[in-house]
Amino acid sequence: MDWDNARTFLALYRSGTLRSAAAALEVDQATVGRRLAALETSLEARLFLRTPRGYVPTTAGELAYAAAERMEQAADQLERQMQGLDRRLSGTVRVATSDTIGRHFLMSSIARLQSQHPGIRIVLATSTHVTNLTRREADLAVRSVRPDNPDLIVRHLSRRAVGLYASHDYLQRYGEPRQGEAFAGHRVVTYTSGALKYRIEALCGESIRNATVAVEANSGLMIVEAVINGLGIGELPVHMAQEIPQLVRIWPKQEEGYDIWLVMHADLHRTARVRAVADVIVEAFAQAY
């Protein structure tokens, strides 16, 4: 099985359309179609049904996916192992994190890194989506979820907390909520249902069943902005919200803690540029205590 054709097949299987597969591979749609046709010809099997909703894998396609995924894992492992021998302090390092962590901790770290090693280029992806480091979606990640994959190296960076905040303007209009009333008569700002793996049913332990959900966002920074602009009460990182003069903390004794972890694949641990990026991130969190 040709690896380029297999990569194309995997992209189409995961995305379902020629356009999105082409975008993921950074090629044109004609190339995706040509490689798929070549793969189907070599295997003498039809791998997808073309439907109005997109490309749906056939039984043969499902079997091919398992084999192609094993090829991808082997190729990724080889690339990681070769990079692990790289002693150059130059090249690209892909970092995945949330937008709030990126703004508050990582930007200053990247600036310091590039003053020391200007040959290192950072590709920063900010999202609530948990990246898959074994598939090379990123070289390292700073996240609030600790992975259990034994191939990953995990380092604890910090213990932080979220609290409830509202703007001065909001509190003038609605007053402060009463504990135990599930935000009755109040408006709240939350993450969208697709942004997190779980449904938001409470803020800092207080149910939101009686609240009006005024804004849903898939970005932590947009939630902060919504709260600043008086759109509702939100659950915000204390280290960030306490520095914003427009915000007032509600029920200061009520908060929920969370941990922040640095994660990288074991095969990349000794890559010089990845190690340099990891070191400045660790330093940034150590200085933030």
Image (cartoon, grey):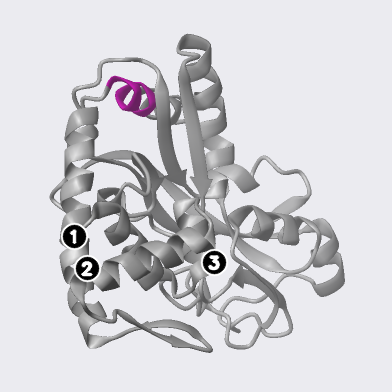
Residue shown at 23% from the left, 80% from the top: 45
Residue assigned mark 2: 42
Task: Give the mark nearest the N terminus, 2 or 3.
Answer: 3
Amino acid identity at mark 1: Met
Residue 119's place in the image compared with 24, above or below, is above
Residue 231 in the figure: left or right of residue 114: right
Q: Are marks 2 and 3 in contact (CB under 8 Å)?
A: no
Residue 19: which numbered mark, if any? 3
> Where does the image place residue 222, in percent across and percent down from the top left?
68, 57
Mark 2 vs mark 3: in front: 2
What range of the chain is rendered magenta?
272-278
> Where does the image place residue 178, in percent across and percent down from the top left?
65, 76
* Prevailing secondary structure of the magenta residues: helix
Considering the numbered disc 2 on the image, is that residue within a helix, a strand or a loop? helix
Amino acid identity at mark 2: Ser
> Where does the image place residue 115, in percent across and percent down from the top left?
53, 12
Residue assigned mark 1: 1
Instruction: Decide whether residue 277 is among the magenta residues.
Output: yes
